[in-house]
Image (cartoon, rainbow, N blue to C red):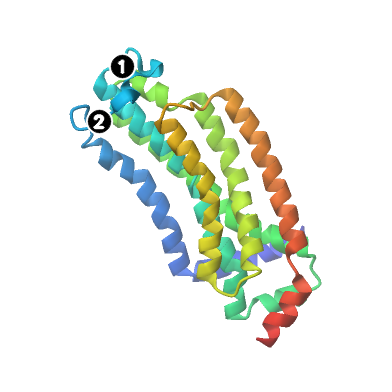
Amino acid sequence: MNNIGAIIRKEWLELRLERWLVATTLLMPLLLTGLPFGILGNATASSTNLGPIANLPMFAGFTPDEIVQIVLLRQFLVLFLLMPLYIPSTIAAHSIVGEKISRTLEPLLAAPVRTSDILLAKSLIAAGPAVLITWLCYGVYMLGASLVALTDNVYTTVFTTAWLVAIILWVPALAMISVALGVIISSRTSDPRTAQQLTKLVVVPLLLLFFAQLAGLLVISPAIVAVASVVLALAASVALVMAVRLFDRENILIKWSSS
């Protein structure tokens, strides 16, 4: 634990010096949190073509303007599942390749510290801020939605207990999956941009959730949250174990030291 704490402190100090990385990492959460309200301000039933969505049973009893708000607010919820994938992937990709460029990785790999401790510390420093930022942005989103929602019924239809539990449980798991993939990819490439781009491919499955919600084919329920939480937790565990096993410490140390 002492080794992990020391590495976390080292990573945190280095992260604070990378102002461009921090700025670009925070840009997306700010945009995703504020964007919905800009769109909602100009969206009405007369200006939005809902098509067959308005006839779905779940919207029975709602006015057209209320349906517009429900659809838009609900779709943007999915974007908060992108944050724990995007934010740590940038940091994790930089933590390996970036340290190669700055020549700070070799001393760490040469130190008498277990690979699992090194990767766990790097994972926590990448995933921790992502989880906290996502939760904070979601809280701001809930507060903003409560102010613009036409009725209380619109608000309670969008911000269900199931979605709240999903944000609490899924976000840490998604962050750790993103970090593990970032470590695997960044340990096998020499370009930080390539590592970041490859890591972001993990967001593709979430697009299916986005379109399923848009088409009314999927509504996040307690059963879905429970099953998905178990699956994501297992996936995160497997990804972290694979990251440790695939991290060829000796080869990286020899190859990168001589480059």
Residue 145: give x, y in percent of width and height: 34, 32
Residue 218 vertical placement versus 232 (above, below): above
Q: Quadrant of the N terminus?
A: bottom right
Tag 1: amino acid: Phe
Q: Quadrant of residue 66?
A: top left
Outermost left residue: 46
Taking the spot 65% from the left edge, 56% from the top edge, the residue there is: 180
The mark closer to the camera, 1 or 2, is: 2
Residue 99: give x, y in percent of width and height: 60, 74
Tell me: 185 left or right of 243.
left
Taking the spot 32% from the left edge, 24% from the top edge, the residue there is: 52
Please give the residue where the numbered disc 1 appears in the rendered image: 62
Question: Looking at the image, which is closer to me, 8 or 233?
Answer: 233
Question: Looking at the image, which is closer to me, 189 or 116?
Answer: 189
Taking the spot 68% from the left edge, 60% from the top edge, the residue there is: 121
Residue 54 vertical placement versus 101 (above, below): above
Visible in this render: residue 135?
no
Residue 191 vertical placement versus 27 (above, below): below
Choose the circle earlier in sequence order: 1 or 2.
Answer: 2
Tag 2: amino acid: Asn
Q: Which mark, by number, is residue 49?
A: 2
Taking the spot 54% from the left edge, 24% from the top edge, the residue there is: 221
Visible in this render: residue 98?
yes
Residue 234: give x, y in percent of width and height: 71, 41
Question: Looking at the image, which is closer to me, 258 or 130?
Answer: 258
Disc 2 element = loop
